[in-house]
Image (spheres, helix red, strand yellow):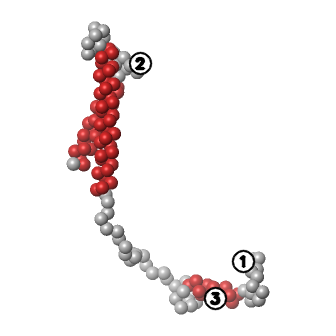
Amino acid sequence: MFLFLTVLQAIVAAMLVGVILMQKSEGGGLGVGGSPSGMMSARGAADLLTRTTSVLAVLFVALSITLAVLAAAEGKVETIDQSLQRDTAPISAPADDVPLVGDDPLAAAAAAAAEEEPAASTDGSVPLDQ
């Protein structure tokens, strides 16, 4: 169904391009001469090409919307993968100079930083350099 509508869309697009290119930019339509009355006069050809263009344009837009809906429905996932399993390797130990504190590298870094800094003031203020 999707392939059929895609082929039909391509045919309608080619016909639309052809009909638009046959029209005169001034509205003369095919530039066909002849009797002033009748279907194949310049005015009759312009009216026919204008009507054909509008019908093909509506058909083109309708096919585009239909194909978009079909493509969106075809690509939907029925279930959501809720697993947390990852294919990445586990985190390796940090450098040798920072020891692990209970398998937590952030706690080890905080412990190392606390050893290097002087004791914080007892009034609860935060130093400006932090």
| Residue at position x 31%, y 38% in the image | 60
Mark 2 Cα-neighbour bin, 10 Å: few <14, some 14–19, many ≥20: few
Residue on which the image places disc 3: 111
Residue 89 image offset from top left, x and y in percent: 43, 78
Q: How many labels does the image show?
A: 3
Residue 64 image offset from top left, x and y in percent: 32, 43
Q: Is residue 5 left or right of residue 97?
A: left
Cα distance in 3D space between marks 2 and 1: 75 Å
Quarter of the image where one finds residue 72: bottom left
Cα distance in 3D space between marks 1 and 3: 16 Å
The disc, 1 or 3, on the residue closer to the chain's N-terminal end is 3
Q: Nearer the viewer, mark 2 or mark 1?
A: 2
The disc, 2 or 1, on the residue closer to the chain's N-terminal end is 2
| Residue at position x 25%, y 40% in the image | 8
Quarter of the image with the C terminus is: bottom right
Cα distance in 3D space between marks 3 and 2: 83 Å
Residue on which the image places disc 2: 26
Q: Tell me the amino acid under the disc marked 3.
A: Ala
Residue 17 image offset from top left, x and y in percent: 33, 31
- Give the numbered dot on residue 94: none
Residue 116 image offset from top left, x and y in percent: 70, 87
